[in-house]
Image (spheres, helix red, strand yellow):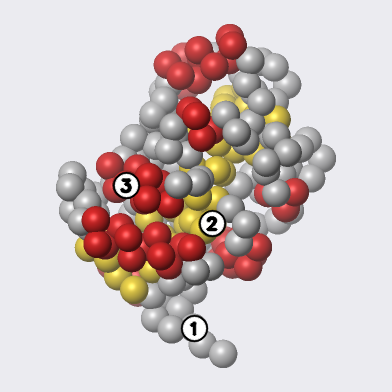
Amino acid sequence: MLRRMARYFDVHPDNPQPRSIGQVVGIVRDGGLIAYPTDSCFALGCQLGNKAGIDRIRQIRHLDDDHHFTLVCRDFAQLGQFVQINNALFRSLKAATPGSYTFILPATKEVPRRLLHPKRKTVGVRIPAHTVTQAILAELGEPLVSSTLLLPGETEPMTEGWSIKETLDHAVDAVVDSGECGTEPTTVIDFSQGEAEVVRRGAGDPTRFE
């Protein structure tokens, strides 16, 4: 059965309309999957306990079981509920956030098993520097389970809201467009073994972790 067409939200990049943000979050809370902008590039996102939404992200992106999903968090208070961080690591991460970095860390028991790396019990986390993303997270009150909107066979993520709406009209429930956002995925830093390992070079400057 074909899904309904995705709702399209044209959101102001600096002053997001509360009504639009409320409607987007309502879709997320009702089990929906959204495409939304971040400071690195567009992402797919759903609620933490939304197994069907996570499965839909896997289907859209053709992801295997080893893929690290990212918990996109509003702030450090939220992030600290889901990953294990010591004091030295906290200072290192705090200096780089909010920003275009994803950190892979050992997960706490708050993270659903289906989101963990099957062998390492780790999860990706990030705190974005994007006004619209932050507005969504503030209204939602919990992290978004996310993955970069990179389609199978493509080398670069999608960057334009109208194009995402055309391409994924029946695959997602809403597209949030606030004009230009980043065009590069985040820089991924793996701290799961204690030392920083740059896994992917992206929008965030990796030199501070090398």
Q: Residues within 10 Å of mark 2 (few under 14, many from 20)?
A: many
Q: Tell me the amino acid under the disc marked 3.
A: Ala
Which numbered dot is residue 135? Answer: 3
Tell me the mark number nearer the camera, choosing from 1 and 3. Answer: 3
Q: How far across and down, in percent of the image, does residue 56 sit?
A: 59, 67
Q: Which badge, 3 or 2, comes first in the chain's sequence?
A: 2
Q: What residue lies at 38% left-to-right and 68% top-to-bottom?
A: 174
Q: Give the label on residue 47, or none.
A: 2
Instruction: Locate residue 117 relative to residue 47 in the image: left or right.
Output: right
Residue at image x 60%, y 47%? 69
Tell which residue pokes out farthest to the right in this image: 119
Q: Secondary structure at mark 2?
A: strand
Q: Classify mark 1: helix, strand or loop.
A: loop
> Could you tell me how far apart the alpha carbons at marks 1 and 3 are, in whole angstroms?
27 Å
Query: Of the residues under marks 2 and 1, which one precedes in the sequence?
Result: 1
Q: Nearer the viewer, residue 132 or 39?
A: 132
Mark 3 crowdedness (10 Å alpha carbons): few <14, some 14-19, many ≥20: some
Distance in Å between CA atoms under marks 3 and 2 = 15 Å
Residue that appears at 72% across and 44% down: 116
What residue occupies the far bottom of the structure in this picture?
1
Report which residue position mark 1 lands on: 3
Q: Earlier in the sequence, mark 1 or mark 3?
A: 1
Q: Would you place residue 33 above or below residue 169 in this image?
A: above
**Numbered-mark total:** 3
Whether residue 154 is visible, yes or no, is no
Identify which amino acid the numbered label 1 is placed on.
Arg
Q: Position of residue 28 (x, y in %)?
A: 46, 62
